[in-house]
Amino acid sequence: MNYLWELVKITFQTFTFMVTDLRYILIMALVFVLVHRQYTKILQYEQGFFRLKRINPLMETVTSLVYGIGGGMLATILFILLGVSVSDAGVAYLWLAALLLMFIDQRFLCFAYAGSLVSLATLLTGFPKIQIATLMALVAILHMVESFLIFVNGYHNASPMFFKHASGKVVGGFALRKFWPMPTIALVGVVMVSSGLDLQSVPMPDWWPLFQSSLEVPDNHMLLHILFPLVVALGYSDFVQTELPKVRARRSAGLLFVYSLLLLGLAYVANQYPVLTILPVLFSALGHELVIYLGRRREKEQTPVFKGDDGVMVLAVYPDSPAEKMGLEAGDVIRSINGIAVENLHELAHQMTPWMIDPILVVENQFHQSTERTIHYKGKVPPLGIVPAPHPEQAAYVRFKEGPLKTLWKKWKSRK
């Protein structure tokens, strides 16, 4: 087991090089700026729609980086343990395919679809020359790490949002959007002349690597796997109307973990039996579509719960507001205030006009408690500081952008 300790030391040395080398610092800074920009957009949306200044983009980005470093460590362990070499996986082609697919629909900016596309091109034309099983293993590992990050961080600071339901009514819900800068360390296979030089190397067990390299090793040469610093970014985007963000995120994380585990298993089978290579290639895209379908099916089949047709339901609270001090949270329904029943937002506003001192609220939350609770607040309201779930006749709601090619196609069809 000495090789484990040697691997830890070399990995630590590589990571130290990564955080002190100017090239990787610049790349990490660029990724940091891009992630910060995404959180700034979320803040701008919340301010524009709800006048809600709830998140700090800088702190969100720093927090995401901390989680990303943890995810990077997990990815590093899996890359090294399984012997997955990025030089065999054709990462450059993977990125190119993902960017091209994004023009069709933004949700296709995903290595699951890009990996299938690149692998199919290799199977049909022989280009690009990659090790398909290794590419599928790479896709599986990244999704496995993503499932971990979604489980522990995917639901934090979910954005309140108004959606138009299939019934035509406007309902409340949440947008779960996370972006993780992830410094990691991957393997790169290199063929070198057997010169007899004393290189810093670690003798690995006979079973390693599980995923064999496709590099040809001539006589008097040897194949070495070197540790290569790598900076990637993972993202998570989802929407929920039927349950709390934490429940939704962890359900999605579980499905994604099962998908990645199955894909990794199929990749290993394809590595052992190349005739079965088509299995992980098809499962990469179709399995990911199944994960999305199962999540969306639940949203369609279940009844939206964040709506204001039965009392005043809290969707979110403003920071440092009376509502936050009262402990109000998503799913709370205000049933009465000072003993007077509240049926809708208009009645709540009427009861608090022009102001109210030391109000007593009766609140019920269908997610956490089956009984009502009474809140005694010392102070003046309004402002109460809540984002209420929308009334079914609410006019304003969010519409989502589609990919450029899909938008052009719809415009062309409408003109026809």
Image (cartoon, rainbow, N blue to C red):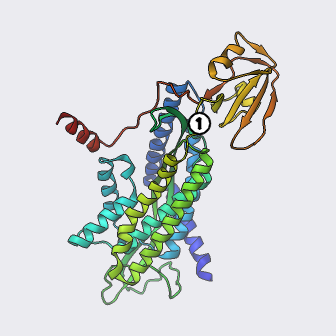
Point out the image quarter for the C terminus: top left
Question: Which residue: 39% across, 80% down?
Answer: 271
Q: Residue furthest left?
A: 416
Residue 143 horizontal/vertical position (percent):
48, 61
The relative height of residue 146 versus residue 125 in the rendered view (above or below) is above
The relative height of residue 117 versus residue 83 in the rendered view (above or below) is above
Quadrant assignment, res 412? top left
- To which residue does mark 1 refer? 306
Residue 122 versus residue 269: which sits nearer the camera?
269
Q: Residue type at mark 1: give it.
A: Phe
Q: Is residue 376 left or right of residue 405?
A: right
Question: Which residue: 46% across, 42% down?
Answer: 33
Q: In this view, does 97 lie to the left or right of 77?
A: left
Question: Which residue: 42% across, 87% down?
Answer: 196
Residue 124 horizontal/vertical position (percent):
22, 71
Q: Is residue 79 left or right of residue 212?
A: right
The relative height of residue 203 versus residue 103 in the rendered view (above or below) is below
Residue 6 versus residue 73: which sits nearer the camera?
73
Residue 101 horizontal/vertical position (percent):
31, 52
Residue 169 versus residue 209: which sits nearer the camera?
169
Residue 157 makes an appearance in the image = yes
Q: How crowded is mark 1: few (under 14 residues within 10 Å), some or many (20 or more)?
A: many
Residue 128 makes an appearance in the image = no
Circle 1 SS class: loop
Residue 217 versus residue 45: which sits nearer the camera?
45
Task: Count the labels in the image.
Answer: 1
Question: Which residue: 41% across, 58% down?
Answer: 289
Quadrant assignment, res 126? bottom left
